[in-house]
Image (spheres, grey):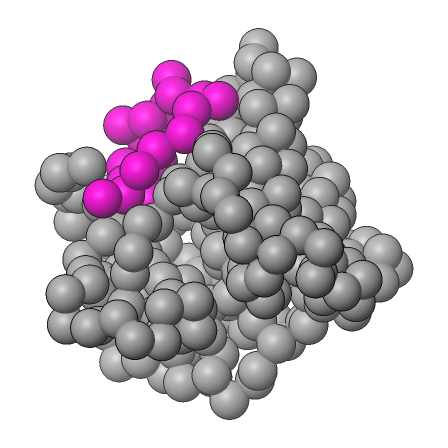
Amino acid sequence: MDYNAPTNLLDNKTILITGAGDGIGKALAIKCADLGANLVLLGRTYSKLDSVAQQIAQLNKQPAKTIQLDLNDATEEQYVNLANQLTKDYINLDGLVHNASQLGKLCKFTEIDNQTWHEVMQTNVNAAFLLTKYLLPLLQAAPSASTIFTTSSVGHKGRALWGTYSVSKFATEGMMQVLADEYSDTVMRFNAVNPGGTRTSMRASAYPEEDVKRLKTPEEILDTYLYLLGDDSSEVTGQRFNAQ
């Protein structure tokens, strides 16, 4: 998508991004802050989150809030506590971006081990379910809240050797569609974005021999995310977008 975001697109909007310590999450957080948003950075590595928060501070924008949470082993109680804390800190939540994902292993279906399957589902599906469920009251309190799920080309059409990740992204798209339909008569909207091949560590682990110079950087694929987070997409819900 070729979208020219106005400089005040996200003024006074509070946006939570998971996996905000690096890759697309980091790039999106910094760009959102630059466009006026108040950022909540969630990730498992504090040093990475702190680094992003410092970069946001250098923009002379609102200080970002950092939340260290490992989605792979977080309990339901931790999600409840997180929601309660955010309710104390913020009146509402204008944007929620489920960016954090786990690839697992590329292998034949019969070679998928149980632990890897559960870890990928925990991060890619269960975490998005619990986080969305308990943050819904904050999203409902916003004038026009946008929730973005991260999908993949293999979440739309299955591909050999990508079993675990593919199934998790099919589930992600299904979750998005269910929420969009359930809340179709509200101002909340739910959509999914497929980033496409991007210069990230996950992409490198999937395609170790690939020439990364041929891939776009995270900063180059943000237009779709910005469109969906801003008010220009206030009537758009239940859709799947390709960022490239």
Work out whether residue 21 can be spotted: yes
Q: Is residue 92 left or right of residue 143?
A: right
Question: Which residues fall within the magenta stretch?
Answer: 224-244
Quarter of the image that includes the N terminus:
top left
User: Is residue 201 magenta-colored?
Assistant: no
Quarter of the image that includes the C terminus:
top left
Work out whether residue 103 can be spotted: no
Determine whether 224 is above or below 78 in the image: above
> Residue 158, position in %: x, y?
51, 38
- Which residue appears farthest toward the right when viewing the image? 77
Q: Could you tell me which residue is drawn at 47 percent across and 83 percent down?
A: 48
Q: Could you tell me which residue is drawn at 14 percent across and 65 percent down?
A: 214
Seen from the viewer's position, the closer of residues 51 and 194 is 194
Determine whether 160 is above or below 174 in the image: below
> Residue 32, position in %: x, y?
31, 56
User: Is residue 226 magenta-colored?
Assistant: yes
Determine whether 65 is above or below 99 in the image: below
> Residue 145, position in %: x, y?
49, 34
Q: In which quarter of the image is residue 127?
A: bottom right
Q: In which quarter of the image is residue 239?
A: top left
Q: In this view, does 21 lie to the left or right of 196?
A: right
Seen from the viewer's position, the closer of residues 16 and 105 is 105
> Residue 93, position in %: x, y?
55, 45
Q: Could you tell me which residue is drawn at 58 percent across and 36 percent down?
A: 170
